[in-house]
Image (spheres, rainbow, N blue to C red):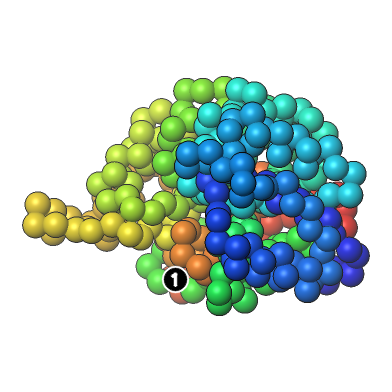
Amino acid sequence: MITQQIGIAIVAPSGYGRDQAALARARARLEQRGCIVHNYYDPAQVFQRFGGTDEARLAQLDAACADPQVQVVMTLRGQYGLTRLLPRIDFEAMAASGKIFVGFSDFTAFQMGLMAKTGAISYTGPMFYGDFGAEAAVDFTLGDFWRCLAGPTHRITQAAEGNPVLSASGTAWGGNLAMLVSLLGTEYFPRIEGGILYVEDINEHPYRVERMLLQLHQAGVLARQRALVLGDFSGYRLGPADNGYDFDAMLAYLRATLPIPVLCGLAFGHGPTRVTIPFGAAATLVSDQCGFELTMTHYPTVRNG
């Protein structure tokens, strides 16, 4: 249980949110937990589809990083924008700040760059606008974040049938699949050996998911991992041309083709119910025919910094 007061900075390095009611709800929910909110996002600075110009969004990150009253830096929302900023982010300063950076979706780009450049751990976790600002916040999603933040161990237990039986240990890493693949071949793609890779996406047809995972496979990334864990893949539509090809058919093909075990059923994605995973933590994955358990240790918390 967290008993200390936490300073949480809000930044918008990707998209924007203009719903004042949602922004107010998010702030109120954090303050009800005893947090002090340091808001670096200004809706008046919205530029095109972004939470500000490139310079303004970089300035938000830098200011939150430099704020001595902040322990956690939380992204406003995903959408798009971080790829533009990667060459100009001072990842060494971000890591040296000791702050816990939290987000998912487009934020995967930041997490990948942070790990590649410094080896620092971040959180794949809830965001200010869509999660804390929701009209009906999901207790599980927010609760899992607070449990992870309290540490020192974070355990995720999922009921899921049909997965392979295994026990594997390695580095937990991953995020949005499209963002991961977009960074292949760049300096922002970390080389992780013996990892447990978790992925999710939205509005991607199963054949696109298959193609992206095959790209990771053909690039040699998957052969270096212990296991692949699939989260939520939703928002796509099947059509007559699919002729029986669907997510289950894709999953069967992947399991027959990829060189590592493939699990599914992780509550992680763009749906409202979502676990928090420390990106870069030491992890143990144990699976049987009824479900699996992912246990993570050796990651920063508000207790250990």
How many other residues sit within 10 Å of disc 1, few (<14), some (14-19) or many (≥20)? some
> The disc labelled 1 sits on which kind of residue?
Ala
In which quadrant of the rendered image does the N terminus lie?
bottom right
Quarter-of-image position of residue 33: bottom right
Quarter-of-image position of residue 28: bottom right
Where residue 150 sits in the image (x, y, percent)? 80, 64
- The answer to whether one can see residue 1 in this image is yes
Q: Residue at x 82, y 64 (%)?
A: 35
Where residue 303 sits in the image (x, y, percent)? 87, 58
Q: Considering the numbered disc 1 on the image, is that residue within a helix, a strand or a loop?
A: loop
Q: Residue at x 71, y 71 (%)?
A: 29
Where residue 142 sits in the image (x, y, percent)? 65, 69
Q: Residue at x 84, y 37 (%)?
A: 66
- Seen from the viewer's position, the closer of residues 82 and 63 is 63
- Seen from the viewer's position, the closer of residues 173 and 87 is 87
- The answer to whether one can see residue 174 in this image is no
